[in-house]
Image (cartoon, rainbow, N blue to C red):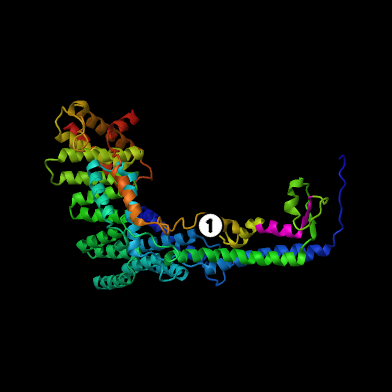
Amino acid sequence: MADPMVQSIHRDPALFYWILFPISVVMILTGVLRHYATVLLQTTPKKQELPALREQRSLLRGINLRSNCSAISSTAFAFRKQYLVSAYKDGTFLKDPENRGKPAGNPMTDPAAMEGMMGMMKGNMAMMIPQTLIMGWINAFFAGFVIMKLPFPLTIRFKSMLQSGVATRDLDVRWVSSLSWYFLNLFGLQSVFIFILGNDNAANQMTQQMSQMNPGAGAGMFQPGQDPDKMFQSEAENLEVVEHEYILEGVEDRLLASIE
Amino acid sequence: MSLSSLLRQSSSEALSLSQQTAQYLQKHASTGTSTIPIPILTYPESTETWVMYEKLFLSSLRTGDDKAALNCLEKLMDRFGATNERVMGLRGLYQEAVAKDDAALERVLQEYDKVLSEDSVNTPIAKRRIALLQSLSRTTEAIDALAELLESSPTDIEAWTELSDLYLAQNLFPQAIFCLEEVLLVAPNAWNIHAHLGEVLYLSAMNGNENYEDRILAEATRRFCRSVELCDDYLRGYYGLKLTSDRLLSIIPDDIKPKEQVGTVDNGELPMFSTAVVRKLNEQASFKLAEITRTSNSSYNVAEVISAKDLLGRSTHRRQR
């Protein structure tokens, strides 16, 4: 094609005032609302009980001993190893020693795990409900409108992205349909939200999805359903096979060598 | 984190910081006051703001400006609520600071006990209670409480360091060394802890342990070596290295040969240094100390530089004699 014919569609300026503008405003407002809704729905992280804390930190101590054993002399290491291994094997640090050996309970029945799940549910709801509503709203009122023309040319691949809801094969890619404008807003308003709400806002769904990738990254090392006793046993085994090396061995030679 | 770094700051820094308090409070008077926070309109709230408040609070307390401290504390309480653990700890600190006599301190202590009986996981208050026991010079109780705290949270570096200091004050060297080793297990590259452990070892060698003095001193020397290996130009490390190697030179025989002849490592202990190595380390430490004292800039603690000069002066004096 030598000279692609420039398509021109005569648009009613009212399309701008009654579709493009309202969709953008509504999207921004929902974002702000979602932010505050999430803030309100947030439950403060529940405090851990002392035995649970002790269980976790004791395991952490073993891990620290294993990875940093070079910092202490072999006598000190052997002493600590003996103590920790026997305590791990006896289950001294367990949160509830009488549950030892029993299979781990269903995470659904564990109230602590339930709470975590509820929190996740709430987050999901705050994201899903407005999305569904607005999508329905746009579909019901504005489906099939071509509302704007991008000021730059695009390849044909963008057609499905920019013209969803408008099933016209020959329409130039530069025309944007109302439904697509909604999607563009949905994904592209992050910087606007940062401007309005500050850096750590909950309005954007991308961050929400990110946080769902690793839920409970800071919630401690024990995932629900994991048997702490097994973790202690395996840590005891790990400790027993650690080869000790003392960092102070030959440190004087290293120091003198580094100076000369 | 910010707390510990704050303790390291010199008095002049604390003073200048606390003098800014009033200004800062005025500037940020609006922070967190409006009920509906609209971030564009108000000063953006950030973690740093509140960390700053905490720092201002602590340095105001240090410089005796109780009124400004109370201002900061009120801000923090407004924002985080009086039941926030960290704020509770700060509030306790304030109450201790304004307490006039021991009876008032006892009352604060009872308050802590009450809080802890309701919520035993409240670490800031537990730590305040221990510090208060210390300042009431009930050291054994403080040690007991710390041991209890560490039983439930054995990875708390701050508590281990504190416990080691307490043991050291009681001349219980093996216990103090144990605690410092625990700290090193969590933070193996903390050069200051390596040097501190060296200091404790040196002290324990100087106080009793006649038979093992050379072995303990060798261990202390190695600790100092490690500390200066981790941190170049670390004044305390070189100071300790100089001190221990001086002492070591005076007690070991002049003709310890290098390792090969002495034999391999037995029962886990490292072999004794050869005399030549100790001498070399000593020379190196003197050299470095002289360099540091000569070019000392503001990054070094003045008192430490002075005592390093003193040590150097003593040893040259002895040599001349």
Q: Quadrant of residue B315?
A: top left
Is most of the magenta stretch helix, strand or loop?
helix
Between B62 and B6, which is closer to the camera in this rendering? Answer: B6
- Tell which of A160 and B204 is nearer to you: A160
Question: B166 above or below B72?
Answer: above
- The reply, left or right, for residue A143 in relation to residue B54 is right
Determine whether, in the image, residue B146 is placed left or right of residue A191.
Answer: left
A203 vs B134, nearest the viewer:
A203
Q: How many labels does the image show?
A: 1
Q: In this view, does B2 lie to the left or right of A167?
A: left
Residue A39 in the image: x percent, y percent? 54, 67
Q: Which residue is drawn at 28% across and 39% down?
A: A244
Specify the quadrant that holds the N terminus of chain B: bottom left
Asked which quadrant contains residue A226, the reply is bottom left
Task: Indicate the quadrant where residue B16 lies.
Answer: bottom left
Q: Is residue B101 above or below residue B228?
A: below
Magenta highlight range: A173-186
What residue is shown at x 25% (from left), y 41% (from top)? B240
**A179 magenta-colored:** yes
Residue B194 visible in image: yes
Which residue is located at x 14 percent, y 31 percent? B253
- Residue plotted at (32% across, 39% down): B228
Where's residue B286, x and y in %? 27, 35
Q: Is residue A234 above or below residue A255?
A: below
Whether residue B68 appears in magenta in the rendering, the answer is no
The residue identified by callout 1 is A212
Q: Which amino acid does label 1 sit on?
A: Gln
